Structure formats: C-alpha cells, structure tokens
Amino acid sequence: MFVNPDLDNDLCERPQYGFIISLTKTMVGKVALVTGSTSGVGVNVATELAARGARVIITGRNAAKLEETRNRIVNVTGNGNVVGKQVDFESLSSIRSFVHEMYIQEPKLNILINNVGAIGLEDRRTEDNLHVMMQINYLGNFLLSFLLFPLLKASAPSRIISVSSISLLLGHIDFEHMNDVGRFSSFGHYANSKLADVLFTVEMNKRIGGSDVSVFSLDPGLIKTDFLRNYKETPFRRFMSWGLFLVGQPTNRVATAYVWLASDPKVVNSSGKHFLYCKEFYSSWFAEDAQLTRRLWEESKRLVKIKDEEDWERNSL
Ligand SMILES: NC(=O)c1ccc[n+]([C@@H]2O[C@H](COP(=O)([O-])OP(=O)(O)OC[C@H]3O[C@@H](n4cnc5c(N)ncnc54)[C@H](OP(=O)(O)O)[C@@H]3O)[C@@H](O)[C@H]2O)c1
C-alpha cells in the first residue's frame, strides 16, 4: 500500500498508481456527498474523502451493496462518519425524497460530486417520461444540484463537481428530441447527456455568482471499471470492455482528480470550468454559447418540474 504522507496541495503533480490515501486530515468538518458510489471510481472517491476526515454520504440503488460499501470504507479509513443512502436516479421522486431527508438530517453540505452514470441501458423512458439515459446521466444531476444548492450555499465555501466524459465532443443538445426513444443510440444519449452536464455547470456558475459555491465539470478520462456492463453480451462489448481495462486508468488514480477538485484552494478561481483530469480543458469553445446554456437550464427546470417553492431563483435566496 502506498500512503501519501504529504499535504494534498500537489495531489495532481505526482502520478500515483498505488493507494493514495493521505495521512493528513484536510477535510475534517466537511460534509461530502458522492453519488453512484457503490461501484467503480465513486467508491475510491468516497474512500479518499473519508480518509481525509470528511463526513461522507454515499448513494446507490441497492441496500445490501450500500451497506457493504459503507463498511468497507469505514474499515479501510477508520472513519465511522460514513452513511449510505438509497437513491434511484431513474426516479425524480426518489431524488426528491433523498433531498428531503438531507435537509432534515444534514445541517451542512460542502461537497456534492455528481458521479452517477450509466451507458448501454435499453432505449426507454422512465416513470417521469424522460429518456432513461438522459435522466440518469444529466437530468438527475441537474435536479439534485438545483435542490441542494440552498444547503450548499448555507454551508459555503462549497463545491459541486459533475462528472462528464470525452464523449461530449460527439454530443449535441436537441431540445425537441432529447428524450425521444428510437432516435439516438445509447452512446448518442450518453454523449448528449455528458455535454449537458458541462453546459449546466457553465450556466449554474453564472446564476450563483457571489454565493461562494464553486461548480466544476470533470472528464475523468478512461477508467478501468465495469462501466459497459449494461450492454448486451456480444463479442463487440467484450472487446470494448477489454479495451477499457487495457487503456483505462486505475480507479484510485482517477480519484485523485476528484479529490483535487473537491479540495484544492487554487481551483476556486476556476468555477464554471471544465477539467480533463487535473487540467482545465476545452470549455471555452463549446460552452460559450450563452443562449444554449440559458435555454438548457430553463428547459431542464421544466423537465424535472421544479416547483415554485423549490425555485431559489424565483424566491431569490
Ligand atoms: N469508466 C469510464 O471509462 C468512464 C469514462 C468517462 C466518464 N465516466 C463517468 O465516470 C462516472 C463513474 O463511472 P464508473 O466507470 O465508475 O462506472 P460504474 O462503476 O458503473 O459506476 C456508476 C455508478 O452509478 C450508479 N448508478 C447507475 N445507474 C444508477 C441509477 N439509476 N440510480 C442510482 N445509481 C446509479 C451505479 O450504481 P450500481 O452499483 O447500483 O450499478 C454505480 O455506483 C460516470 O459518471 C461515468 O459516466 C466513466
């Protein structure tokens, strides 16, 4: 096991392929929420944040998996301040119930990491009449971030990190058809949703100026996870999965970028920006269309049915 005895301020400067848990408790007193943290890189991110002393809330769909992951994080880090919450991003009411619980049970929240993601799901709409890929990969993140913003603001300084992907370069926002069945491939919906994650980050940054809540989007690069598992079992899928394992980065290495964005004081000045791993990246050219980001924000509010009493923009926090 490799233990990093140094402070975290140069986390991204030194590539680390071992276990990166720090000995320094740089996040004591902070509360972090990591979605999609029962498998893949989310587990490592939650572990790293717990190791730094934060109270960590992990989310997943499966109660047994949540309990098992929570116990593992507690055992590895020695931090008992880890809680598991069941949330299904296919259901907006599940997200709303979770947020309701958060406001009752958590007096503060400093870090929200929108890490949940899926690809290869069947082409269908959810109970909310949204495309399942769009809802899990983007609209759920939008709703969660929107609803938790007042708590993040009250707990500031705070940060929101939304996980995107290089696939966004192939995405586009088609307002008329973004939730259509039979129009895009699973990858197409994924690319559109990951582009939307970046665009909403840009727009949110404009709307929350002065709040001391910083927002970032992150392309973690390719990661060695079982992310393609929802695709039908075909030779092509097996080939792609092997490819991911061959060229992808290990999850503990990728978690470094998440922790860095969640904690490094220097990045606060880059709120609204898109990062590829630990470097500010290409947001300038594809996220500059202010009309597009504004329209996406308004349309997202409509699609997730933001109620008057939830609308902090209207109620001017
Ligand atoms: N792997 C890559 O190469 C890669 C590349 C670029 C970006 N990313 C992004 O990185 C993030 C993490 O991906 P990963 O590779 O770590 O994948 P992963 O192992 O599949 O983890 C995804 C997480 O999202 C959860 N999830 C999926 N559908 C959900 C739903 N309907 N409701 C609640 N939770 C749900 C999964 O829960 P379960 O455990 O219940 O399935 C899991 O915890 C994703 O946003 C992904 O798009 C990945």
Image: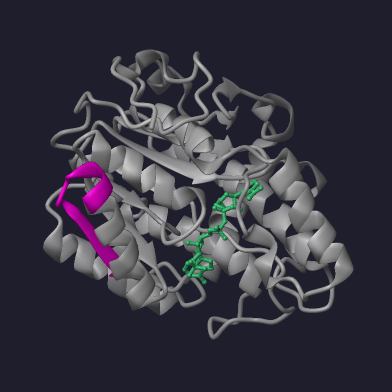
Q: Which residues are magenta?
A: 75-85
- Indicate whether residue 84 is drawn in magenta: yes
Establish if 64 lies above or below 56.
below
Quadrant showing the N terminus:
top left
Residue 198 lies in quadrant: top right
Residue 189 shown left or right of residue 31 in the figure: right
Camera-side residue: 122 or 312? 122
Task: Name the colour scheme.
Answer: one colour
Residue 70 shown left or right of residue 242 in the figure: left
- Indicate whether residue 78 is drawn in magenta: yes
Q: How many marks?
A: 0
Residue 166 shown left or right of residue 299 in the figure: right
Which residue is drawn at the image coordinates 75% and 75% (left, top)? 180
Which residue is drawn at the image coordinates 41% and 51% (left, top)? 43
Camera-side residue: 43 or 100? 43
Q: Residue placed farthest to the front in the image?
A: 1
Residue 41: x and y in percent read: 50, 48
Establish if 70 lies above or below 96.
above
For the question of whether residue 229 can be seen, the reply is yes
For the question of whether residue 317 can be seen, the reply is no
Residue 89: x and y in percent read: 48, 70
Camera-side residue: 40 or 213? 40
Residue 137 lies in quadrant: bottom right
Which residue is drawn at the image coordinates 49% and 69% (left, top)? 304
Establish if 170 lies above or below 87.
above
Ligand 1, seen in the image, is in the quarter at: bottom right
Residue 82 lies in quadrant: bottom left
Residue 78: x and y in percent read: 17, 45
